[in-house]
Amino acid sequence: MSIKTVSRVVNREANVRPETRTRVEDAIRDLDFEPNPAARGLAGRRTFSIGLLYEIPHEFSYIQQLLEGVFAVCETHGYTLLLRPVNESPDAADIVRFIAQTRVDGVVLTAPIGDRREVTDALTTRRTPFVQISPGITDARWTSVGPDDFAGSRVLTEHLLGLGHERIAFIKGDPRHGATEQRLNGHTQSLNDHGIDVDQALIVPGRFDFESGKSAAHRLFALRERPTAIIASNDDMAAGVIVAAREAGIALPAGLSVAGFDDSPTASHTWPPLTTVRQPTADIASHAAELLLEWIRGERSSHTRKTFDCRLVVRQSTAALEG
């Protein structure tokens, strides 16, 4: 076999006949050969590594699913995955320094980092391939992947309306995340479709964490006419609502229906278990990584936005309105 043919097989490139690929893979297995990433980088302009930039999370399950999805693709294609946690206000210069020092071939930007214009501008100027996950801001020059937050939130509100609830409160997420606005818009659109006016007193801020959900719930319980159902923009905040309801002596779901979003492990660990919307986080991350590698290999001539459907998961935290 020629060096180039073996290289194509090792690097999972196309244009190799199946029988040729099999012969090379058999030899690799027989010789117990493992490619050396450093040597691969020296042989060309690629390092066969990508970076994953993520904000230090309040709760790790979402990031864990992202890591699993991206890592599975890296392992399949023989790439190394480098992780770079950042704070709430990432400095574009620090991110550029990370890319320059590690020489990664491209980066996956999770929310809300992908919405930092100074970051995307810096990467565009450097011509560093990147893919956004769940962005609020998109551009024809960029590639992004995410769930259909609008439709998922709409289905969740439809579920509660179908149970007879009309006074439905909504706890928003972190305003820096694109998902926050999309989930709120899906909720309000569903209310409008049913001829129900949006009561701004029932829409309260949150931060995608347990404490903000709990605080928001107590604020809603203090209203003269409290809601009969509460939708939280993620499961962590919904768990906070459940604890707040217990503290207030409100029975669930007889006295209050509660729903979340994401279908994280939290959703099945609360009592009662949460009705929520499942987004295929690992699949989203895997697809983002595949698109990034296609861009790095020069196999994509244009950029794209891929949206994944979400699915309603009904559990015991929601019930028909009594009386």
Image (cartoon, rainbow, N blue to C red):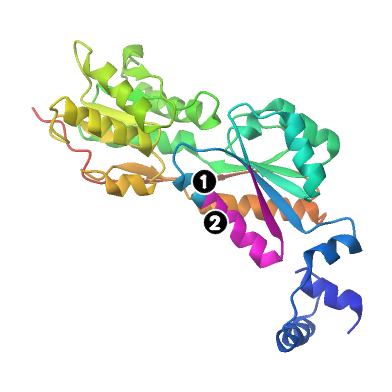
In front: 128, or 53?
Answer: 53
Q: Who comes first in sequence, dot 1 or dot 2?
A: 1
Residue 53, percent across and down?
Answer: 64, 42
Residue 189, percent across and down?
Answer: 41, 25
The residue positioned 56% from the left and 42% from the top of the image is 146
Image side of residue 279 versus residue 294, left or right: left
Residue 68 colored magenta?
yes
Magenta stretch bounds: 65-84
Placement of 198 over or under 161, stated as above or below: above
In the rendered structure, find residue 63 and report the number of the disc placed on it.
Answer: 1
Placement of 137 over or under 62, stated as above or below: above
Element under disc 2: helix
Image side of residue 301 versus residue 44, left or right: left
Placement of 222 over or under 61, stated as above or below: above
The N terminus - image quarter? bottom right
What residue is pinned by disc 2? Answer: 68
Residue 171 colored magenta?
no
Residue 91, percent across and down?
Answer: 70, 28
Number of disc labels: 2
